[in-house]
Image (cartoon, helix red, strand yellow):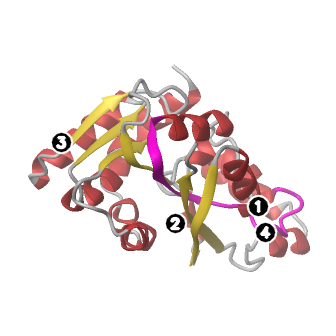
Amino acid sequence: MSSFEDYFSKHASEYARSRSHKNGEDLKSMVTLLNPSGSWRVLDMATGTGFTAMALAPFVSEVTGLDATEEMLSNAVALAEKSGIRNVKFVRGKVEQSGQDSESFDLVTCRRAAHHFPDKEAFVREAKRVLKKNGLFAMIDMVRPESDLDDVRNRMEILRDSSHIDAPTVEFWKQLLSENGFSEVNIYSTKERIAFPDFLSPVRLDSEEGKSCLEYLESLPRKALENADIDPEDYSIVKERVIFIYRKRGE
């Protein structure tokens, strides 16, 4: 089992109980910005425990939630059944090779997951492949501050979660999407300051990972922390999540 599957298998139940993943302002904002149509077919990539898929379901025709981890999907199925949502199905698959038909979805979404993807270009290309012409792609993910020249945020994330690969900057995503056949529709940024123990969740402060993160922060000069939007006094963190809404260009 990969570190990715191991981490999410271990923490699937915590994600299923996460209020932030279920009711985060970033999710509400994305649904509002998209203004979904009742005729749409939607693919939610790296759906996890299915909160994004279930949030969209009341507004569209059908949603397919795709994830690589069986334990996450099991929780998603249970949550959808408990909520009485009937137009969502969950399938196992990878974002780089989803197994879905080409040009079969009006909207592809991906929320709080892309920082785990080792091949971000393959993910973007797969999203484009399964989208209908002029279909919409909507992604939400954390981004690294442009001022974080020492890459503190990514180093800290890896200590907390070994499945973390890289949270790039906004400019990285804009360039990648543009180069792979997408046109910008809307980019919306959300920011919140969170306490260090909350940042670690679902990892505990007294765990090996939590202690490693704290030791790393304590080793850094004040300027490096400030550049990474981390308070040098209490290590609270400004987490920026960005909603990227792009349209597949007609060919």
Q: Secondary structure at mark 4?
A: loop
> Mark 2 or mark 3, which has the lower sequence index?
3
Density class for disc 1 (Cα within 10 Å; few <14, some 14-19, many ≥20) is few
In the rendered structure, the answer to whether residue 222 lies left or right of residue 126 reads right
- Using the numbered discs, state the Cα–Cα distance from disc 3 to disc 4 in whole angstroms: 38 Å
| Residue at image mark 3 | 78
The image quadrant of residue 195 is bottom right
Answer above or below: position of 218 versus 137: below
| Residue at image mark 2 | 198
> In the image shown, does 244 or 204 lie closer to the viewer?
244
The amino acid at mark 3 is Ala
Q: Are marks 1 and 4 in contact (CB under 8 Å)?
A: no
> Mark 1 or mark 3, which has the lower sequence index?
3
> In the image shown, does 117 or 107 lie closer to the viewer?
107
Count of numbered circles on the image: 4
Q: Is residue 14 visible?
A: yes
Q: Position of residue 10 (x, y in %)?
A: 42, 35
The amino acid at mark 2 is Asp
| Residue at image mark 1 | 171
Q: Position of residue 196 (x, y in %)?
A: 60, 68
